Amino acid sequence: MTTPGHLRVVRPGLLTTVQDLGRWSHQVDAVPVAGAMDVFSHRLANHLVGNAPDAATLEITLIGPELVVEADTVLAVTGADFDLSCGDAVVASGATFAVRRGQVVRFGRRHRGARAYLALAGGGVLTPPVLGSRATHIVSHMGGLDGRALAAGDALPIAGAATCPPNRARGLTLPSGGRARLRVMPGPQDDWFGDEAWQALTGVSFRISPRSNRMGYRLEGPPLAHARSGEPISEPVTMGAIQVPAAGEPILLMADRQTAGGYPKIGHVITADLCMAAQLAPGEFIEFDRSTYREAVTALIARERELMAQMTQPQNGGPAR
Amino acid sequence: MQIRQAGDAMLLVEFEPVIDPLVNQRAIELGRLLRARGISGVRDIVPAYCALAVHFDPLRTDLAALERAIAEDGRETSTVEALPEPMVHEIPVAYGGADGPDLQAVADFARCTPAEVVERHAAATYRVYMLGFVPGFAYLGRVDARIAAPRRRVPREVVPAGSVGIAGEQTGVYPIATPGGWQIVGRASVVMFDAGRTPASLLAPGDLVRFVPR
């Protein structure tokens, strides 16, 4: 029998949460989906250490943590590009690295991207699943570790000892210069917005407000006027929806969105581009391009091929350090 | 009934844009029929007041086949003209005092006494139209127009779990402590949502609710 493992939190970082592919199929009870903001990087991190795509990773936001790994295991970090160290050694993002029990993994300076994903061999973070998922949803205090972000002194259950072949991957091409272009499918409330609103949406850069979080990004720019008055009757919403309250400041709904909302939606960011949105930080910029369903699916297939190509590449990392 | 795309991963089936038990029942029924089909790629089926969302994985779903299934089942549910025998829940509520800090404000709005507000709120049988906001929060309608006070101008930073609120012609019970702007008239002593319980949510769309003053 192996000794159970733990991940001890010395410093939690700005916002570090346990995430997976989300808590689906309970939205009828208003249970939010949550899950990784950048699903591409989450899946890649799991692949590198030999986990299933839905194993729980740590989502690390802007400022990374310092963790003591209480197991002989293998880790990989993908997504945002941070300086990383394990014990006294510098380790690379996007590659597996072996850790001995008691070693300290430190996140240093962040160079690009907003969110990193830390995966651990042997099945990842093993906090108890809630309604079939380990994803943390902070507002409803659900999943992860007691439904909250990690704090100093926490101990997260992980597999006691695990190994996997060395592996590395290039990872997601992160947004550069603090901005990204995202493609938007119009609707479903097309009739609530005139040409002016569309010209405003696609004509300028929107700044991601500091009042943004995993639920949604408030976007600062020209107000998007409603072409009619009132509010639609509350209806289900999904990640990527751009909802526009009467004051005209759009909100891009992200992973921790509520299950339903009563604001008209001018459009939806396509799934292929949501991982790029997830890698932008408050204060950075979004530009929108109008898109179609056909383009959205083509882009998603391309994104999936990009991920598959990185997953099937020969394991050329040499022995895990 | 109209099927609209809401991005590349959700279809929104829209019914007549009204808050009406029969329209709501059609959305619920359509959801039930579609769920029973077990369509490949579908991640979640979510009814609302007068719409039904079908969340799907665009890479694992035959969109045309999904739309055909919705149209077929929609033809069946569009003829729903009667409501099924509902589940009826009686929820005990302590009205007023510290449990219902806005009871007087609602009475002022209604130009009646707090006791009359309680009487009117507890006299109605409410339908669960949908759940939203936080896990287990059910939107109940309709509140007697005479006590249908609008939301507070300044929302509270914390509304305690179990609080019973009024917002216009809607009423509901807060399952967990959360910020909220509804007029709080009382406190229910039942657990509205428990992830460790099956079903997790006390209330489901289509159920009926009566509040019992205690």
Image (spheres, rainbow, N blue to C red):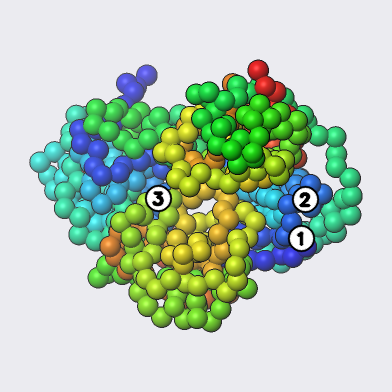
Asked if labels 2 and 3 share a chain, the reply is no
Of helix, strand and loop, which one carries label 2? Answer: loop
Q: Amino acid at mark 3?
A: Arg
Which residue is label 1 attached to?
B16
| Residue at image point 69% right, 30% down | B116
Which residue is label 3 attached to?
A214
Of helix, strand and loop, which one carries label 1? Answer: loop
Q: Point out residue B204 in the picture as x, y percentages from the top left corner.
A: 69, 37
Graded by Cα atoms within 10 Å as few (under 14), some (14 to 19) or many (20 or more), the crowding at tag 2 reads some
Of helix, strand and loop, which one carries label 3? Answer: loop
Foreground mark, 3 or 1, reads: 1
Q: Point out residue B146 in the picture as x, y percentages from the top left corner.
A: 70, 42
Graded by Cα atoms within 10 Å as few (under 14), some (14 to 19) or many (20 or more), the crowding at tag 1 reads few
User: What chain does badge 2 belong to?
Assistant: B
Foreground mark, 2 or 3, reads: 2
| Residue at image point 24% right, 61% down | A112
In the rendered structure, the answer to whether residue B8 lies left or right of residue A276 reads right
- Compared to residue B26, the image places residue A220 above or below, namely below
Q: Nearer the viewer, residue A188 or B60?
A: A188
Asked if labels 3 and 1 share a chain, the reply is no
User: What chain does badge 1 belong to?
Assistant: B
Q: CA distance from mark 3 to mark 1?
A: 33 Å
Q: CA distance from mark 1 to mark 2?
A: 9 Å
In the rendered structure, the answer to whether residue A13 lies left or right of residue B110 reads left
| Quarter occupied by the C terminus of chain B | top right
Say which mark, if any, is on residue B20: 2
Q: Amino acid at mark 2?
A: Asp
Q: Point out residue A201 in the picture as x, y percentages from the top left corner.
A: 45, 75
Q: Are marks 1 and 2 in contact (CB under 8 Å)?
A: yes
User: What chain does badge 3 belong to?
Assistant: A
